[in-house]
Image: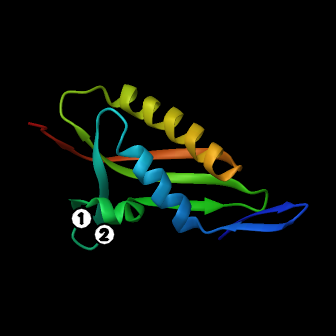
Amino acid sequence: MQGQMETNLGKIVIESDVIATYAGSVAVECFGIVGMAAVNMKDGLVKLLKKDYLNHGIAVSIDENNEITLDFHVIISYGVSVATVADNLMETVKYKVESFTGMTVKAMNIYVEGVRVID
């Protein structure tokens, strides 16, 4: 679904892939996040996504009130607090996505798919 806004000059339409890509680029800059995860449902395998495919680890849904729900599948650093990383991710992404789109983030769901040791 697309996000839509009406202005006095016309209509603005934002594709959900644009929101997912932006949210993914913001997420990987957050402390404790190694990257986005792609989950192969058939095999149950989790794979770290490259920067070009960050939007594959995020599901975006936009309701009829133009409110965004984001589902993140992330891989975090070993030894960090999951709660702290999740709180930081939620606050940062919510603020930046709302500023970027002009729409409200209604909910964010974070699925920790793996842990990686960072050298």
* In-front residue for pair 26/80: 26
Q: Position of residue 56 (x, y in %)?
A: 39, 65
Which residue extends farthest front? 9
Which quadrant holds residue 52? bottom left
Which quadrant holds residue 42? bottom left
**What residue is drawn where x is 58% and y is 66%?**
16
Location of residue 89 with respect to 19 vertically, above or below: above
Dot 1: what SS? loop
- The answer to the question of whether label 1 and label 2 lie on touching residues, with beta carbons closer than 8 A, is yes
- Residue type at tag 1: Gly
- For disc 2, the marked residue is 41
Please give left or right for residue 16 compared with residue 41 in the image: right
Please give left or right for residue 115 compared with residue 24 in the image: left
Image quadrant holding the C terminus, namely: top left
| Residue 2, disc | none
- For disc 1, the marked residue is 44
Please give left or right for residue 43 compared with residue 24 in the image: left
**What residue is drawn where x is 26% and y is 61%?**
50
Location of residue 30 with respect to 64 vertically, above or below: above
**What residue is drawn where x is 38% and y is 25%?**
84
Q: Position of residue 83 (x, y in %)?
A: 38, 28
Applied colour scheme: rainbow
> 10 Å neighbourhood of mark 2: few (<14), some, or many (≥20)?
few
What is the spatial separation of the Cα atoms under label 1 and label 2, in whole angstroms? 5 Å
**What residue is drawn where x is 71% and y is 49%?**
102
Q: Position of residue 99 (x, y in %)?
A: 64, 43
* In-front residue for pair 38/99: 99
Which residue extends farthest right? 8
Q: Position of residue 71 (x, y in %)?
A: 48, 53
